[in-house]
Image: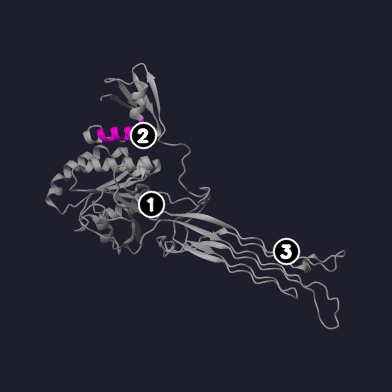
Protein backbone atom coordinates (compact mmCIF):
# COMPACT_ATOMS: atom_id res chain seq x y z
CA UNK A 1 0.00 0.00 0.00
CA UNK A 2 1.27 3.46 -0.90
CA UNK A 3 1.34 5.80 2.09
CA UNK A 4 2.99 9.19 1.78
CA UNK A 5 2.26 10.70 5.21
CA UNK A 6 2.88 9.35 8.69
CA UNK A 7 3.10 10.62 12.25
CA UNK A 8 5.51 8.79 14.50
CA UNK A 9 6.72 9.06 18.07
CA UNK A 10 10.46 8.77 18.68
CA UNK A 11 12.38 8.59 21.93
CA UNK A 12 16.12 8.35 22.37
CA UNK A 13 17.76 6.18 24.97
CA UNK A 14 18.32 7.46 28.50
CA UNK A 15 21.92 7.72 29.60
CA UNK A 16 23.13 5.04 32.00
CA UNK A 17 23.58 5.96 35.64
CA UNK A 18 27.06 6.48 37.02
CA UNK A 19 28.16 4.08 39.76
CA UNK A 20 29.15 4.75 43.35
CA UNK A 21 31.71 2.14 44.30
CA UNK A 22 34.93 1.85 46.26
CA UNK A 23 37.81 -0.45 45.60
CA UNK A 24 37.81 -3.25 48.13
CA UNK A 25 40.66 -5.71 47.86
CA UNK A 26 42.69 -7.66 50.33
CA UNK A 27 45.57 -5.62 51.61
CA UNK A 28 44.07 -2.48 50.03
CA UNK A 29 41.84 -1.20 52.81
CA UNK A 30 41.37 2.24 51.34
CA UNK A 31 41.44 1.67 47.63
CA UNK A 32 39.42 4.75 46.88
CA UNK A 33 36.46 5.35 44.56
CA UNK A 34 36.28 3.34 41.36
CA UNK A 35 32.66 3.75 40.24
CA UNK A 36 32.44 3.92 36.43
CA UNK A 37 30.42 6.18 34.17
CA UNK A 38 27.12 5.18 32.69
CA UNK A 39 26.86 4.48 28.98
CA UNK A 40 25.38 6.91 26.50
CA UNK A 41 21.79 6.36 25.40
CA UNK A 42 21.13 5.43 21.80
CA UNK A 43 20.20 8.03 19.21
CA UNK A 44 17.18 7.79 16.93
CA UNK A 45 18.33 8.23 13.34
CA UNK A 46 16.38 8.40 10.10
CA UNK A 47 18.26 6.90 7.16
CA UNK A 48 17.38 7.03 3.47
CA UNK A 49 17.10 3.63 1.78
CA UNK A 50 16.87 3.84 -2.00
CA UNK A 51 14.76 0.69 -2.36
CA UNK A 52 11.86 2.22 -0.41
CA UNK A 53 9.20 4.36 -2.12
CA UNK A 54 6.44 4.53 0.48
CA UNK A 55 5.92 5.19 4.18
CA UNK A 56 3.70 2.13 4.54
CA UNK A 57 6.04 0.56 7.12
CA UNK A 58 4.78 3.14 9.63
CA UNK A 59 1.18 2.05 9.23
CA UNK A 60 1.41 -0.68 11.87
CA UNK A 61 4.31 0.66 13.92
CA UNK A 62 4.59 4.33 14.78
CA UNK A 63 6.44 4.37 18.11
CA UNK A 64 10.20 4.01 18.25
CA UNK A 65 12.42 3.92 21.34
CA UNK A 66 16.18 3.63 21.29
CA UNK A 67 18.07 1.55 23.82
CA UNK A 68 19.22 3.20 27.02
CA UNK A 69 22.80 3.20 28.28
CA UNK A 70 23.89 0.67 30.90
CA UNK A 71 24.88 1.58 34.42
CA UNK A 72 28.54 2.11 35.20
CA UNK A 73 30.36 -0.69 37.01
CA UNK A 74 33.13 -1.10 39.54
CA UNK A 75 36.81 -0.86 38.71
CA UNK A 76 36.06 2.28 36.63
CA UNK A 77 34.14 0.24 34.11
CA UNK A 78 31.98 2.40 31.84
CA UNK A 79 28.53 1.07 31.14
CA UNK A 80 27.68 -0.15 27.67
CA UNK A 81 26.26 2.51 25.37
CA UNK A 82 22.79 1.93 24.03
CA UNK A 83 22.47 0.93 20.40
CA UNK A 84 21.33 3.63 18.02
CA UNK A 85 17.92 3.04 16.49
CA UNK A 86 18.01 3.35 12.70
CA UNK A 87 14.66 4.01 11.02
CA UNK A 88 14.59 3.52 7.25
CA UNK A 89 12.72 6.05 5.11
CA UNK A 90 12.38 6.48 1.33
CA UNK A 91 14.21 9.20 -0.62
CA UNK A 92 12.23 12.42 -0.69
CA UNK A 93 11.02 12.29 2.93
CA UNK A 94 10.52 15.65 4.61
CA UNK A 95 10.60 15.55 8.41
CA UNK A 96 8.52 17.99 10.47
CA UNK A 97 8.15 18.51 14.19
CA UNK A 98 4.48 17.67 14.50
CA UNK A 99 3.97 19.93 17.52
CA UNK A 100 5.50 23.10 16.10
CA UNK A 101 5.34 22.50 12.36
CA UNK A 102 9.05 23.28 12.01
CA UNK A 103 11.01 21.50 9.31
CA UNK A 104 13.73 19.32 10.78
CA UNK A 105 15.20 17.95 7.57
CA UNK A 106 14.70 16.99 3.95
CA UNK A 107 16.08 13.53 3.21
CA UNK A 108 16.92 13.21 -0.47
CA UNK A 109 20.24 11.47 -1.04
CA UNK A 110 20.72 7.73 -0.61
CA UNK A 111 22.15 6.82 2.81
CA UNK A 112 21.50 10.36 4.03
CA UNK A 113 21.13 10.27 7.82
CA UNK A 114 19.31 12.63 10.16
CA UNK A 115 19.48 12.36 13.94
CA UNK A 116 16.05 13.28 15.27
CA UNK A 117 16.54 12.40 18.95
CA UNK A 118 19.91 12.42 20.70
CA UNK A 119 20.60 9.84 23.34
CA UNK A 120 21.22 11.00 26.87
CA UNK A 121 24.78 11.35 28.13
CA UNK A 122 25.90 8.73 30.59
CA UNK A 123 26.15 9.85 34.21
CA UNK A 124 29.56 10.18 35.76
CA UNK A 125 30.68 7.65 38.35
CA UNK A 126 32.06 8.66 41.73
CA UNK A 127 35.64 8.20 40.54
CA UNK A 128 35.16 11.40 38.54
CA UNK A 129 34.43 13.39 41.68
CA UNK A 130 37.54 12.51 43.67
CA UNK A 131 39.61 15.53 44.62
CA UNK A 132 42.16 16.58 47.17
CA UNK A 133 39.42 17.76 49.44
CA UNK A 134 37.08 14.85 48.79
CA UNK A 135 38.96 11.60 48.83
CA UNK A 136 35.88 9.44 49.39
CA UNK A 137 33.17 10.87 47.12
CA UNK A 138 29.84 9.15 47.56
CA UNK A 139 28.39 10.90 44.61
CA UNK A 140 27.67 10.06 41.03
CA UNK A 141 25.34 11.22 38.27
CA UNK A 142 22.31 9.56 36.87
CA UNK A 143 22.14 9.37 33.15
CA UNK A 144 20.83 12.25 31.11
CA UNK A 145 17.12 11.86 30.30
CA UNK A 146 15.97 10.81 26.85
CA UNK A 147 14.62 13.14 24.18
CA UNK A 148 11.20 12.52 22.75
CA UNK A 149 9.19 14.15 20.00
CA UNK A 150 6.36 13.58 17.58
CA UNK A 151 7.41 13.72 13.95
CA UNK A 152 5.36 14.12 10.82
CA UNK A 153 6.88 12.44 7.79
CA UNK A 154 5.79 13.60 4.35
CA UNK A 155 6.97 11.91 1.17
CA UNK A 156 7.55 13.75 -2.09
CA UNK A 157 8.52 11.33 -4.79
CA UNK A 158 11.82 11.98 -6.53
CA UNK A 159 11.51 11.66 -10.28
CA UNK A 160 12.95 13.43 -13.31
CA UNK A 161 9.61 13.58 -15.08
CA UNK A 162 6.04 13.92 -13.84
CA UNK A 163 3.17 12.66 -16.01
CA UNK A 164 0.14 14.85 -15.38
CA UNK A 165 -3.30 15.17 -16.91
CA UNK A 166 -7.01 14.80 -16.36
CA UNK A 167 -8.45 11.49 -15.11
CA UNK A 168 -8.47 8.71 -17.72
CA UNK A 169 -5.99 10.49 -20.00
CA UNK A 170 -3.83 7.36 -20.16
CA UNK A 171 -1.01 8.28 -17.78
CA UNK A 172 -0.73 4.82 -16.23
CA UNK A 173 -0.86 3.22 -19.67
CA UNK A 174 2.00 5.41 -20.83
CA UNK A 175 4.08 4.63 -17.74
CA UNK A 176 3.55 0.89 -18.09
CA UNK A 177 4.37 1.07 -21.81
CA UNK A 178 7.76 2.72 -21.30
CA UNK A 179 8.89 1.06 -18.08
CA UNK A 180 8.51 -2.05 -15.96
CA UNK A 181 6.01 -0.34 -13.66
CA UNK A 182 2.71 -2.17 -13.39
CA UNK A 183 0.10 0.34 -12.25
CA UNK A 184 -3.56 -0.60 -12.10
CA UNK A 185 -5.21 0.33 -15.39
CA UNK A 186 -8.90 0.39 -16.32
CA UNK A 187 -11.21 2.39 -18.58
CA UNK A 188 -12.79 4.55 -15.90
CA UNK A 189 -11.70 7.74 -14.14
CA UNK A 190 -9.49 7.71 -11.08
CA UNK A 191 -8.14 4.20 -11.59
CA UNK A 192 -4.84 5.51 -10.23
CA UNK A 193 -5.26 6.38 -6.57
CA UNK A 194 -1.57 6.57 -5.73
CA UNK A 195 1.50 7.89 -7.58
CA UNK A 196 3.54 5.29 -9.44
CA UNK A 197 7.24 5.35 -10.31
CA UNK A 198 8.87 3.80 -13.35
CA UNK A 199 12.21 3.89 -15.14
CA UNK A 200 12.30 4.20 -18.92
CA UNK A 201 15.56 3.13 -20.58
CA UNK A 202 15.94 4.69 -24.03
CA UNK A 203 19.47 3.49 -24.71
CA UNK A 204 22.48 2.37 -22.66
CA UNK A 205 23.31 5.99 -21.81
CA UNK A 206 19.83 7.46 -21.42
CA UNK A 207 17.22 6.62 -18.81
CA UNK A 208 14.38 8.57 -17.23
CA UNK A 209 12.66 8.23 -13.86
CA UNK A 210 8.96 8.98 -14.36
CA UNK A 211 6.17 9.50 -11.85
CA UNK A 212 2.56 8.91 -12.87
CA UNK A 213 0.57 11.46 -10.86
CA UNK A 214 -3.11 10.57 -10.32
CA UNK A 215 -5.57 12.60 -12.40
CA UNK A 216 -6.02 16.19 -11.30
CA UNK A 217 -9.46 17.76 -11.10
CA UNK A 218 -10.81 21.24 -10.63
CA UNK A 219 -10.17 22.39 -7.07
CA UNK A 220 -7.14 20.14 -6.58
CA UNK A 221 -5.13 23.09 -5.25
CA UNK A 222 -7.64 23.32 -2.39
CA UNK A 223 -7.32 19.63 -1.57
CA UNK A 224 -10.43 18.56 -3.49
CA UNK A 225 -10.05 14.98 -4.67
CA UNK A 226 -6.93 14.59 -2.48
CA UNK A 227 -5.33 17.29 -4.61
CA UNK A 228 -2.74 18.36 -2.04
CA UNK A 229 -1.67 14.76 -1.52
CA UNK A 230 -0.85 14.39 -5.22
CA UNK A 231 0.29 17.87 -6.23
CA UNK A 232 3.26 17.87 -3.86
CA UNK A 233 4.76 14.89 -5.71
CA UNK A 234 5.15 17.10 -8.80
CA UNK A 235 7.21 19.68 -6.95
CA UNK A 236 10.48 17.74 -7.16
CA UNK A 237 10.16 16.86 -10.86
CA UNK A 238 12.13 18.88 -13.42
CA UNK A 239 10.01 18.30 -16.53
CA UNK A 240 6.31 17.51 -16.97
CA UNK A 241 4.61 15.38 -19.61
CA UNK A 242 1.13 16.88 -19.91
CA UNK A 243 -1.02 14.09 -21.31
CA UNK A 244 -4.37 15.01 -22.90
CA UNK A 245 -7.25 12.62 -23.44
CA UNK A 246 -7.99 12.54 -27.17
CA UNK A 247 -11.57 11.43 -26.43
CA UNK A 248 -12.28 14.20 -23.93
CA UNK A 249 -15.05 16.66 -24.69
CA UNK A 250 -12.59 19.57 -24.77
CA UNK A 251 -8.90 18.63 -24.45
CA UNK A 252 -7.82 22.29 -24.61
CA UNK A 253 -10.08 23.18 -21.70
CA UNK A 254 -8.64 20.24 -19.73
CA UNK A 255 -5.18 21.53 -20.55
CA UNK A 256 -6.09 24.99 -19.23
CA UNK A 257 -7.70 23.61 -16.10
CA UNK A 258 -4.73 21.47 -15.12
CA UNK A 259 -2.27 24.33 -15.62
CA UNK A 260 -4.42 26.64 -13.55
CA UNK A 261 -4.55 24.11 -10.72
CA UNK A 262 -0.76 23.77 -10.80
CA UNK A 263 -0.24 27.53 -10.65
CA UNK A 264 -2.76 28.03 -7.86
CA UNK A 265 -1.07 25.36 -5.74
CA UNK A 266 2.50 26.55 -6.35
CA UNK A 267 3.54 29.30 -8.80
CA UNK A 268 6.83 27.48 -9.43
CA UNK A 269 4.94 24.52 -10.90
CA UNK A 270 3.67 26.75 -13.72
CA UNK A 271 7.29 27.49 -14.65
CA UNK A 272 8.29 23.87 -15.16
CA UNK A 273 8.93 22.85 -18.80
CA UNK A 274 6.07 20.84 -20.27
CA UNK A 275 5.91 18.49 -23.22
CA UNK A 276 2.26 18.23 -24.25
CA UNK A 277 0.94 15.04 -25.85
CA UNK A 278 -2.51 14.19 -27.17
CA UNK A 279 -3.08 10.50 -26.42
CA UNK A 280 -5.19 7.76 -28.10
CA UNK A 281 -4.13 8.54 -31.68
CA UNK A 282 -4.81 4.91 -32.53
CA UNK A 283 -8.50 5.87 -32.70
CA UNK A 284 -9.87 7.43 -35.94
CA UNK A 285 -11.94 10.05 -34.09
CA UNK A 286 -8.85 11.32 -32.29
CA UNK A 287 -6.84 11.42 -35.53
CA UNK A 288 -9.57 13.51 -37.11
CA UNK A 289 -9.60 16.13 -34.36
CA UNK A 290 -5.80 16.37 -33.96
CA UNK A 291 -5.34 19.34 -36.38
CA UNK A 292 -7.92 21.38 -34.45
CA UNK A 293 -6.42 20.51 -31.07
CA UNK A 294 -2.89 21.22 -32.30
CA UNK A 295 -3.93 24.64 -33.60
CA UNK A 296 -5.62 25.49 -30.30
CA UNK A 297 -2.60 24.46 -28.27
CA UNK A 298 -0.18 26.33 -30.53
CA UNK A 299 -2.24 29.47 -30.06
CA UNK A 300 -1.64 29.43 -26.32
CA UNK A 301 1.76 27.72 -26.01
CA UNK A 302 3.51 30.89 -24.87
CA UNK A 303 1.40 30.96 -21.69
CA UNK A 304 3.45 28.10 -20.26
CA UNK A 305 6.88 26.59 -20.78
CA UNK A 306 5.73 24.32 -23.62
CA UNK A 307 8.81 22.57 -25.00
CA UNK A 308 7.14 20.15 -27.39
CA UNK A 309 3.81 19.01 -28.80
CA UNK A 310 3.14 15.41 -29.82
CA UNK A 311 0.29 13.19 -30.95
CA UNK A 312 0.82 9.72 -29.47
CA UNK A 313 -0.81 6.42 -28.71
CA UNK A 314 0.38 4.91 -25.44
CA UNK A 315 -1.32 1.63 -26.34
CA UNK A 316 0.13 1.31 -29.85
CA UNK A 317 3.43 3.02 -29.03
CA UNK A 318 2.97 5.65 -31.74
CA UNK A 319 5.47 8.52 -31.26
CA UNK A 320 6.13 7.43 -27.67
CA UNK A 321 9.87 6.97 -28.21
CA UNK A 322 10.10 10.36 -29.94
CA UNK A 323 8.28 11.91 -27.00
CA UNK A 324 10.70 10.41 -24.48
CA UNK A 325 13.78 11.50 -26.42
CA UNK A 326 12.37 15.02 -26.48
CA UNK A 327 11.88 14.82 -22.72
CA UNK A 328 15.49 13.64 -22.30
CA UNK A 329 16.74 16.57 -24.41
CA UNK A 330 14.78 19.08 -22.32
CA UNK A 331 16.09 17.48 -19.13
CA UNK A 332 19.63 18.06 -20.34
CA UNK A 333 18.79 21.74 -20.80
CA UNK A 334 17.23 22.14 -17.35
CA UNK A 335 19.79 22.95 -14.64
CA UNK A 336 20.34 20.21 -12.11
CA UNK A 337 19.03 20.94 -8.62
CA UNK A 338 21.46 22.96 -6.53
CA UNK A 339 23.12 21.23 -3.57
CA UNK A 340 20.88 21.21 -0.54
CA UNK A 341 22.07 24.05 1.66
CA UNK A 342 18.76 24.82 3.27
CA UNK A 343 15.77 22.52 3.38
CA UNK A 344 14.04 23.05 0.00
CA UNK A 345 10.53 23.16 1.36
CA UNK A 346 7.79 25.21 -0.22
CA UNK A 347 6.82 28.06 2.07
CA UNK A 348 4.30 30.85 1.77
CA UNK A 349 5.50 34.28 2.89
CA UNK A 350 1.88 35.43 2.59
CA UNK A 351 -1.43 33.81 1.81
CA UNK A 352 -1.74 33.84 -2.01
CA UNK A 353 -5.53 33.74 -1.64
CA UNK A 354 -5.60 37.22 -0.13
CA UNK A 355 -7.06 39.93 -2.32
CA UNK A 356 -7.90 43.64 -2.31
CA UNK A 357 -10.81 45.51 -3.87
CA UNK A 358 -10.42 49.16 -4.84
CA UNK A 359 -13.06 51.50 -6.30
CA UNK A 360 -11.73 53.39 -9.30
CA UNK A 361 -13.28 56.08 -11.51
CA UNK A 362 -14.05 53.61 -14.27
CA UNK A 363 -14.85 50.51 -12.23
CA UNK A 364 -13.49 48.15 -9.59
CA UNK A 365 -9.93 46.87 -9.32
CA UNK A 366 -9.42 43.39 -7.85
CA UNK A 367 -5.81 42.56 -7.02
CA UNK A 368 -4.30 39.46 -5.45
CA UNK A 369 -1.73 36.82 -6.31
CA UNK A 370 -4.08 33.88 -6.86
CA UNK A 371 -6.90 35.69 -8.65
CA UNK A 372 -4.60 37.59 -11.00
CA UNK A 373 -2.73 34.42 -11.85
CA UNK A 374 -6.02 32.60 -12.47
CA UNK A 375 -7.23 35.44 -14.71
CA UNK A 376 -4.02 35.47 -16.73
CA UNK A 377 -4.35 31.73 -17.37
CA UNK A 378 -8.03 31.71 -18.27
CA UNK A 379 -9.06 31.09 -21.88
CA UNK A 380 -11.65 33.81 -22.20
CA UNK A 381 -12.82 32.54 -25.58
CA UNK A 382 -14.18 29.39 -23.90
CA UNK A 383 -17.44 29.83 -22.01
CA UNK A 384 -16.73 26.97 -19.61
CA UNK A 385 -13.37 28.46 -18.80
CA UNK A 386 -15.03 31.78 -18.00
CA UNK A 387 -17.53 30.00 -15.76
CA UNK A 388 -14.68 28.28 -14.01
CA UNK A 389 -13.05 31.65 -13.35
CA UNK A 390 -16.33 32.82 -11.85
CA UNK A 391 -16.32 29.82 -9.52
CA UNK A 392 -12.78 30.65 -8.46
CA UNK A 393 -13.93 34.17 -7.58
CA UNK A 394 -16.75 32.69 -5.51
CA UNK A 395 -14.41 30.22 -3.79
CA UNK A 396 -11.92 32.94 -2.86
CA UNK A 397 -14.74 35.14 -1.54
CA UNK A 398 -14.21 37.87 -4.12
CA UNK A 399 -17.75 37.61 -5.46
CA UNK A 400 -19.30 38.29 -2.06
CA UNK A 401 -16.76 41.01 -1.25
CA UNK A 402 -17.63 42.90 -4.44
CA UNK A 403 -21.32 42.72 -3.62
CA UNK A 404 -20.68 44.08 -0.14
CA UNK A 405 -18.56 46.85 -1.62
CA UNK A 406 -21.50 47.96 -3.77
CA UNK A 407 -20.82 46.61 -7.26
CA UNK A 408 -23.75 47.03 -9.66
CA UNK A 409 -24.82 45.20 -12.81
CA UNK A 410 -22.87 46.59 -15.75
CA UNK A 411 -19.93 47.81 -13.66
CA UNK A 412 -16.45 47.11 -14.97
CA UNK A 413 -14.20 44.86 -12.90
CA UNK A 414 -10.47 44.87 -13.61
CA UNK A 415 -8.38 41.80 -12.74
CA UNK A 416 -4.80 42.15 -13.87
CA UNK A 417 -4.88 43.12 -17.55
CA UNK A 418 -8.41 41.80 -18.00
CA UNK A 419 -11.51 43.98 -18.13
CA UNK A 420 -14.74 42.23 -17.12
CA UNK A 421 -18.36 43.30 -16.92
CA UNK A 422 -20.29 42.47 -13.76
CA UNK A 423 -23.42 40.43 -14.36
CA UNK A 424 -25.75 38.69 -11.94
Disc 3: which residue: 141
Residue at (24, 59) in percent of width and height: 185
Q: Is residue 400 magenta?
A: no
Q: Position of residue 41 (x, y in %)?
A: 62, 65
Residue at (67, 64) in percent of width and height: 143
Q: Earlier in the sequence, mark 3 or mark 1?
A: 3
Instruction: Label 3, secondary structure: give it.
Output: loop
Instruction: Label 1, secondary structure: give it.
Output: helix
User: Badge 1: how crowded within 10 Å, few (<14), some, or many (20+)?
Assistant: many
Q: Gap between marks 2 and 1, in whole Å?
A: 25 Å
Instruction: Label 2, secondary structure: give it.
Output: helix
Residue 418 visible here: yes
Disc 2: which residue: 396
Q: Position of residue 401 (x, y in %)?
A: 36, 27
Q: Main secondary structure of the magenta part?
A: helix
Q: Position of residue 153 (x, y in %)?
A: 46, 55
- Front of the two marks 2 and 1: 2
Q: Earlier in the sequence, mark 2 or mark 1?
A: 1
In which quadrant will I find the N terminus?
bottom left
Going by the image, does 237 lie left or right of 190?
A: right
Going by the image, does 419 lie left or right of 104?
A: left
Q: Which residues are magenta?
A: 386-397
- Front of the two marks 2 and 3: 3
- Front of the two marks 3 and 1: 3
Q: Gap between marks 2 and 3, in whole Å?
A: 60 Å
- In the rendered structure, find residue 233 and report the number of the disc placed on it: 1
Amino acid sequence: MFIDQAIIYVRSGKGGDGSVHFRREKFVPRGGPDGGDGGKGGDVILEVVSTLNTLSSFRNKNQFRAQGGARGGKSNMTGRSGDDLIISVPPGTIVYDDNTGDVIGDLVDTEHRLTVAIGGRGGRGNARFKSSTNQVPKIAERGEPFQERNLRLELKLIADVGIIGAPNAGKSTLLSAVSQAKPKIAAYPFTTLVPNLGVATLDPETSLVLADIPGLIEGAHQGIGLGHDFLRHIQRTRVLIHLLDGLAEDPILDYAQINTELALFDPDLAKKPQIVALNKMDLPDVQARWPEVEAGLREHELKIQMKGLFAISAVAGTNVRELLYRVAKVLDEVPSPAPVIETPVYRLDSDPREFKIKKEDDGWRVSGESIERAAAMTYWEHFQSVRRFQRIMETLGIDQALREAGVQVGDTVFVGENELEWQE
